[in-house]
Image (cartoon, rainbow, N blue to C red):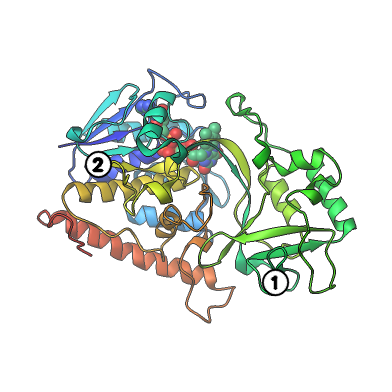
Amino acid sequence: MAITILGGGLAGCEAAWQLVKRGTRVRLIEMKPERFSPAHESENLGELVCSNSFRSASLNSAAGLLKEEMRLMDSLIVTAARATSVPAGKALAVDRERFSRFITERISGNPLVTLERREITRIPHVEEGTVIVATGPLTSDSLADDIARSVGADGLSFYDAIAPIVEADSLDMNKLFSASRYEEGEGDYLNAPMDEETYRRFVDAVIWAQKVDPYPFEKIPHFEGCLPIEEIARRGPDTLAFGPMKPVGLIDPATGRRPYAVVQLRAENREKTLYNLVGFQTKMTHPEQEKMFRTIPGLESATFARLGSIHRNTYLDAPRLLDRFSRSTALPHVFFAGQITGVEGYIESAASGLIVGIMAGLCARGITPEPPPSSTAVGGLLKHTRDTTPKKYEPMNVNFGLMDAPPPGTTKKRKKEVLAAAAIAEIRKWIGRVDKLWEEEEGEKGAVVF
Ligand SMILES: Cc1cc2nc3c(=O)[nH]c(=O)nc-3n(C[C@H](O)[C@H](O)[C@H](O)COP(=O)(O)OP(=O)(O)OC[C@H]3O[C@@H](n4cnc5c(N)ncnc54)[C@H](O)[C@@H]3O)c2cc1C
């Protein structure tokens, strides 16, 4: 029986490609051109809705490493991007029209693909076989309602309001102190103390910083619980110091006094390799955020794993609703892939589609695979979608902080090089095991084969 994929975007097309290249039939259902989301306008599959960049091509960046892992796994999206690239310095950028035409031809011209151009308004029943939902951040309303009904209304978000995340080893720990409010000694938070002058300069800069112009469909009312920091700053010179930057219950051990204001950083994962700037959701542009947040004491050399944003984004509470194969625990014939699982970005969505396509294909054959290890960029990214550490699950870009730590003794300078070399070796092994499994007879249902 064919595997049904909902959504012919980056994740859906990559999942379809991984299945058909291994001989599995696919039914792909895409609503364009019958219906367009507010951001899509081309009839082609694999449309890029905004920038034409797939970010850095260097193995020194997590996005570059992820693309290299995908290339080693014969990714359609990476092949299309390389075939239609345009000069963009160290980044991989594409001619968007040729890029999505390339994908459309490869998918619609494949004899194992049946392409249905219509909006689907409910998740297909189990009798219709395995399903991969890859309808993206702008999933149409009727399907989103059906997904919410199936997984529970609390399980699906329609907007994100996300704060920046920094890599722990890029912080200057001499300027930060560990404490939770009203506690003595070591605490759960890292605190960046500010005196009054530093605080006032910071607030001014936040107010005047350049903000992202939202799309018309993203002009949403702000909820009091997750206001952007620039909106809080605009309300009065001390509003931030009484809000997310309040210093109450905190004593700076360097001065023995309560600071005028603090920025609190909370661990984002169990390994404490990533820290979230608590309450710092923002619509400032990315360059402004990097400039602004590096003025915070201790963050002068911060590496940002993710920058803040507030935008329209349909995504599941994946760690609580999906298993390690990205399969719904409520509906075991349904897998989710792409941005709807809480990965963020073109290349991350495509990578999710690639792995979920393979895992859904194996599961449909009665084989229980192991997801790629978290020593790889793609494995680290998927581990994020299973991480229940943060109280509220938020979308994430790929970054080195999601991957397993390098061996002890690795210098900071060599860290990325060591992680990249290990990741490439591991992904080669993983895809080798997958291809071997695919060739073998159907495994015993439920057996863990590797
Ligand atoms: C406005 C906007 C701008 C963005 N800009 C960038 C950017 O510049 N860079 C970046 O890296 N990331 C960006 N993203 C984030 C994200 O990475 C992309 O949206 C990416 O395309 C997600 O891939 P996907 O395959 O999950 O979803 P999509 O690529 O959106 O694909 C989903 C597909 O499903 C179809 N679909 C939806 N509902 C149904 C239905 N009911 N029935 C049938 N088909 C359906 C859609 O038409 C679409 O073709 C942006 C997101 C948005 C919303």
Q: Secondary structure at mark 1?
A: loop
Q: Residue furthest left?
A: 441
Which residue is tagged 2?
333
Q: Nearer the viewer, mark 1 or mark 2?
A: 2
Q: Residue furthest top?
A: 34
Against 398, residue 85 (above or below) is: above
Q: What label sits on residue 226 in the rendered view?
A: none
How far, Cα to Cα, is label 1 from label 2? 47 Å
Amino acid on which disc 1 is placed: Met
Q: Residue furthest right?
A: 197
Instruction: Specify whether residue 87 is in view.
Output: yes
Near mark 1 (Cα within 10 A), the count class, few <14, some 14-19 or many ≥20, is some
Near mark 2 (Cα within 10 A), the count class, few <14, some 14-19 or many ≥20, is many
| The one of 403 and 45 positioned closer to us in this rendering | 403
Identify the residue at horizontal 36%, vertical 45% (top origin).
353
Where residue 30 appears, as percent x and y from the top left, is 34, 27
Which residue is tagged 1?
173
Amino acid on which disc 2 is placed: His
Against 114, residue 417 (above or below) is: below
